[in-house]
Every structure is written in C-alpha cells, then in structure tokens.
C-alpha cells in the first residue's frame, strides 16, 4: 500500500457506489490497500466497475477467517461454504485422513487444517490446471500435495478404502441455470467449477458412487448442494450405500450433506 490522498479515497468509494457496488466503502478500502499508487488504483477500479470480481483484483478471498489466494478463473471461496467445513468438523475425529476433491483454491483444506484435531491432510485434487497451481500456492505451507486429475482417479490406489474424510465443493449448478448466476460468477469463473450437468448432480453422483470404496469404514463424504437438490442427492448417496444427513444454515443460505460409509459395509472396490 502506498499513500493515497483522502480525496482520492473518497472519489474511489464514490465511483464504486455509482457503479452499484453495495459494499463500496469496504471495497474502496481494500482496493486502496491492494494498489501500488494512484494509477494502479485507477486501473483496479476500472476493472471492478466493469464487473470483475473484487477477489481477483485483490488476489485473495476471505474464507473462514483466512486470506486465501485466488487467481482469475479459479472459483472464489464463498462465505456459505463455512457450513461444509463445520459439518465436516462435526463428524470427524482426531488424526483423520483427509482428501479434498474439486479443490479450486484449496480453501477447504486450509480451513480444515485449523478446525480438525491433528488431521492428516493427504492431498487436494482438481481437474483445472489453473486451480491446481493456485491450490499449490495456498497449500504449500501445509505440505499438502495437489494432484491434477478427475476426482478419486488422481489419488494413489493404495489410499482406497482408507480415507476418513473426503470433502468437495463440487460443481452443482444445473447447466441450464448457469445463465442465471450473478455476472461475476457467470462471466469470470471457470464453467468447469460450476456446471453440474443437466440436474446439477452429475459430479456429485460420481462422487457418491466412488466414495463408497475410497472411504474407510465409518468415514464421511461431505459436500455442499443446492436446497432443491437435497432429495435427489440423498437418494443417490443412499443408493451408493452411504448414510446421508442434511445440514442447513439459514443465515448463510447454505445446505451441506454428510454421507457416512457404514462401519459394517463390505467395500465394493478392489481394496485389499
Ligand atoms: N452458485 C453456487 C455458489 O455460488 C455454485 C457453487 C458450486 O457449484 N459449487 O455457491
């Protein structure tokens, strides 16, 4: 941050407000903090006024009390996803083995590192190379490897049947509803992070089926989902052999589901 005159600060907030930014005061302060000087500030405000997400301009998003680095295209961690973290922490014991799939920036792993007791954070996985690079930056200090690949396929085969917790904020927006997302999301985030196929559950269904063999007996899959999709996803989880529970937080506008692999269930996969 460099010195920016009070007049320029006020003008910045005013421009943001006139462009329709609801949190113009806060955004103005953060953009001043991020800028290298008046010219750089003007450039950032131009981009914000044109609709670019604030988080891409700052280079970080706040999630569960931490600043998580984000780069353009990578899914911006949402405040509501704190419910997924709380739901995972509520069902997970100490020294759990943990994997994050569809990791985007790796925000969930960062939050779980603080919320769980002595977790063994094995890996985070994403399909999108931009997300993999971003998560590597966010998870380097934790020593968590980030693999590029498709869900469980990216993991070492030896982990099958041994995971205590699998978390994923997988894409769950129905393809036909992508156009209804706020422009910041629709225009700037990678569609692969949002598009959940015809009914929004294409990725979550695959997760449900595969989790059955990758979880340890008694282990949990924990995901976020849209409120209107709870019944369908619950049925898919049950059909896969897991025991689902729905968790809601009205003030966050969030719905999460935990799904446990029963302790007595024989694995379907080739665990040995
Ligand atoms: N629209 C949802 C959100 O903003 C999309 C989340 C997702 O697909 N994982 O939270």
Image (cartoon, grey):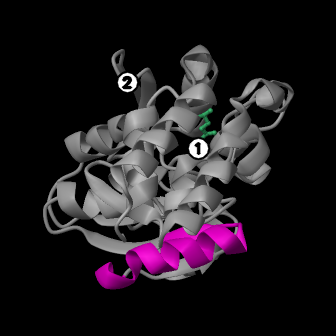
Q: Earlier in the sequence, mark 1 or mark 2?
A: 1
Membership of 131 in magenta stretch: yes
The numbered mark at residue 208 is 1
Q: Measured from the top left, where is residue 225 in percent x and y?
A: 55, 30
Asked if disc 2 is less than 8 Å from ligand 1, the answer is no
Q: Measured from the top left, where is residue 93 in percent x and y?
A: 17, 54
**Residue at coordinates 48% horizontally, 49% vertically from top-left?**
77
**Residue at coordinates 59% horizontally, 78% vertically from top-left?**
133
Distance of label 1 from label 2 (alpha carbons): 25 Å
Residue located beneath label 2 in the image: 252
Query: In terms of depth relative to the viewer, which is nearer, 160 or 33?
Result: 33
Q: Assess disc 2: are there few (<14), some (14-19) or many (≥20) residues with their C-alpha within 10 Å of its C-alpha.
A: few
Is residue 214 visible to the viewer in this orientation of the structure?
no
Give SS at disc 2: loop
Q: Quadrant of ligand 1?
A: top right
Position of residue 17 relative to residue 195, above or below, is above
Tags 1 and 2 in contact by the CB under 8 Å rule? no
Q: Main secondary structure of the magenta part?
A: helix
Give SS at disc 1: helix
Q: Measured from the top left, where is residue 193 in percent x and y?
A: 68, 50
Q: Measured from the top left, where is residue 86 in percent x and y?
A: 27, 40
Is residue 36 visible to the viewer in this orientation of the structure?
yes
For the record, the magenta segment spans: 124-143
Q: Left or right: where does residue 134 sit relative to residue 243?
A: right
**Residue at coordinates 67% horizontally, 50% vertically from top-left?**
46
Q: Assess disc 1: are there few (<14), some (14-19) or many (≥20) residues with their C-alpha within 10 Å of its C-alpha.
A: many
**Residue at coordinates 29% horizontally, 57% vertically from top-left?**
66
Q: Left or right: where does residue 220 sit relative to residue 92?
A: right
Position of residue 222 relative to residue 246, above or below, is below
């Amino acid at each position: 941050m460099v010195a920016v005159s009070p007049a320029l600060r006020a003008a910045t907030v005013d421009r943001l407000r006139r462009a329709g930014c609801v949190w113009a005061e806060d955004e103005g302060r953060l953009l001043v903090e991020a800028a290298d000087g008046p010219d750089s500030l003007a450039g950032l405000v131009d981009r914000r006024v044109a609709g670019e997400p604030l988080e891409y301009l700052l280079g970080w998003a706040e999630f569960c009390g931490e600043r998580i680095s984000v780069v353009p295209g990578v899914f911006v961690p949402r405040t509501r996803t704190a419910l997924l973290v709380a739901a995972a922490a509520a069902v997970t014991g100490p020294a759990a083995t943990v994997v994050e799939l569809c990791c985007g920036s790796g925000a969930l792993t960062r939050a779980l590192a603080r919320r769980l007791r002595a977790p063994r954070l094995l890996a985070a996985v994403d399909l999108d190379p931009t997300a993999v690079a971003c998560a590597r930056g966010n998870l380097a200090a934790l020593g968590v490897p980030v693999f590029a690949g498709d869900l469980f396929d990216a993991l070492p085969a030896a982990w099958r049947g041994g995971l205590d917790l699998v978390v994923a904020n997988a894409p769950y927006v129905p393809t036909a509803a992508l156009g209804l997302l706020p422009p910041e999301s629709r225009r700037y985030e990678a569609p692969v992070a949002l598009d959940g196929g015809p009914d929004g559950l294409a990725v979550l269904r695959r997760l449900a089926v595969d989790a059955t063999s990758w979880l340890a007996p008694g282990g949990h899959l924990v995901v976020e989902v849209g409120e209107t999709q709870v019944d369908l996803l619950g049925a898919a989880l049950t059909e896969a052999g897991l025991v689902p529970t729905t968790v809601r937080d009205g003030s966050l506008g969030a719905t999460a589901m935990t799904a446990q692999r029963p302790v007595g269930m024989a694995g379907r996969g080739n665990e040995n």
